[in-house]
Amino acid sequence: MFETAELGRKVSKKDFAAEEPKVHTALLKNQSALRDAGVPVIVIVSGIEGAGKGAFVNRLHKWLDTRGVETHALWEESEEERERPFFWRFWRVMPARGSISVLFGSWYTKPIVDHALNQTDVDAYERALHRNVQLERLLVDDGALIIKFWFHLTRKQQQARLAADLKTKSASPQLKAYARSYKRFANVSERAIRLTDRSHAPWHIIEAADEYYRDLYAGRHLLEAMEHRLASLPNTQTPAVESIPPQAVPTVGPTERTVLETVDLTASLGGKDYDKQLESRQTELRQLAWKAKNQGRNTVMVFEGWDAAGKGGAIRRVTAGMDARLYRVISTAAPTDEELAHHYLWRFWRHIPRAGHMTIYDRSWYGRVLVERVERIATTEAWKRAYQEINDFEEQLVEHGVILFKFWLHISPEEQLARFKQREKIERKQHKITDEDWRNRARRHAYRAAVHDMVARSSTDYAPWTLISANDKKRARIEVLDTVCERLAKELD
C-alpha cells in the first residue's frame, strides 16, 4: 500500500508558488459554500512521525478562514479523558454545522500506537478499528464530510529527518521512540488504513518527503473532497417533515398487544411500607454511591415515560439518597441552537460522568425514536438509523465500565388524565401541564407504538430496559430504588 507514496515525487518551489494561490482561493470559496450549506468538516491528520504533519496544519491555517476552523491536538489522554469512554474526548471537539475541525491525532492514534507497542492484541486492535468505522458512518449519515490524510515517509527518509532534528535539538520524543520501530508501526498503520478505508470516509496517502509536493497534493485532495460534497447537495433543502400524517406512524394496531401491556398497573404500596422502604433504600444507596466513587465506577441513569408518569418524583427520591457532589441531573428539553448545530448524540456525550460520578438524564437520546419520530421532526430514515446508533453508544459506555440504567415509567391513559386534571387545579403544579402535554396525549397510540419499537430494538443484554408500573407513584419510586441498589451492589461487589 505505501509503495505508492515512495516514488520520489517532488514539486519545485517555483511550481508551488504558481499553483498554491489557486488552491488557496478555491479552498476559501468552498469553505464558504460548505458553511452556508451547514456541512461540518472533519480533517484527520495522521502519518509517520517526522512527515511534516504540523507543517501541513500550519499551511491549512493560512489557506482557510481561521474564523471557521479549530485545530485540536489529540495525543496523550488526560486523566479526565481516561475516566470516560474513549470517544468522549472526540465528541467534545466535533465541529458544528458549517465549521471545520482539524484533528491532529485522532481516534486512530491510540489504537495504532497501543498495538504497535504490543500493548493490545489483534482482536482488541480490530475491535477499535471497527468502532472507528461505526463512528465515521454515524457522522457522515448526519451530513459530515470526513477527510483522512496519512503522510508517509520511508524508513530512510524518517532517519534523515531524525538526524536533522537531533542536530537542531528539535526532535520530538515521539519521533525518537517510533523511529526505532518503523517497520512495526508501518505494518500496523497499513492494516488500519486497509480496514477503515471506506467510500464515505476514504484515506488519502500522501508522499511527504518533499514539503511542496506534500502540501500541494494534500490541499488538492481536500479541495476535491469539498467540491464533491457540495456537488452532492440538493439544489433545495429537503424538508425534515414528511408529508404523511402522524397517524401513519404506528407499526402496531390500537388493539394489538405491546410490551407495555405486560406491566401490571394494579400494583400498589401502602404509606407505612413506603416510608420504611424509602428510608432503607436511600441509606443503602448513599453507601453504594460512595462505594462507586471509591472504585471509580461511572453511573448513567435514563428516565423516560409518559407525561405525568412521575419521572421527576422518582429522580428526586434517587438523588435524596446521595451526596450532591456525586451526581448531576440533566433535564433534556428542546435542543438549543448550539445543540442543533451538532449530531443529536453530541449533547448527551458531553455530559457523560467522570469516574466515580453519576449522570441522571430526565429524558434522553431516546427522544430521537420517540418524540422526533411521532412529531415527524426526524425523517423516517433518521429515526430508524438511530436504533443502531444508540445501541453502539450504550455499548461503548458499558465496555468502559459505566453502570447503565434505563427506566420507562408506565401509567394508564385514565391515570394520566386524572393527573393532568389535578395539575390544572393545583396552583403549584400548573406549570407542569402544557398544551404540548395534551397534544402528546392525543397521539398516545402513536407513542405507544414507538415505545414498543424502542424496547424491542434497544433493550440489550448490556443495556436492558426496566419497565416500571407507575400508576402508584410510591410503588414506582421504590421499584426504581430497588433496581438501582440491587444492580449497584452486584456491579460493585
Image (cartoon, rainbow, N blue to C red):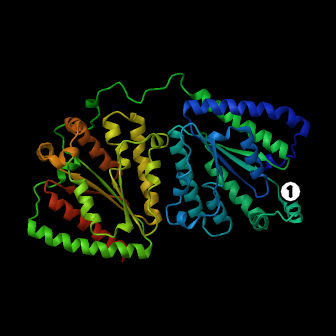
> Can I make out residue 153 in this image?
yes
User: Which residue: 22% across, 46% down?
Assistant: 432
Mark 1: few, some, or many residues within 10 Å (few <14, many ≥20)? some
Determine whether the residue tagged by mark 1 lies in a helix, strand or loop: helix
157 left or right, relative to 252: right
Q: Position of residue 32 (x, y in %)?
A: 63, 31
The residue lying toward the viewer, choosing from 72 and 135, is 72
Name the amino acid, label 1: Gln
Q: Which residue in the protein does label 1 denote? A: 157
Q: Is residue 1 visible to the viewer in this orientation of the structure? A: no
Relative height, residue 325 to residue 65 (above, below): below
Q: Position of residue 173 (x, y in %)?
A: 75, 67
Q: In this image, 252 relative to 212: left or right? A: left
Left or right of residue 369, residue 212 in this image: right
Q: Quadrant of residue 109?
A: bottom right
Q: Residue at x 32, y 26 (%)?
A: 244
Residue with the most extreme top position: 235
> Where does residue 75 sit, x and y in percent of width and height?
65, 60
Is 180 drawn above or below residue 158 in the view shown?
below
> Could you tell me which quadrant the C terminus lies in?
bottom left
Of 129 and 159, the residue lying toward us: 159
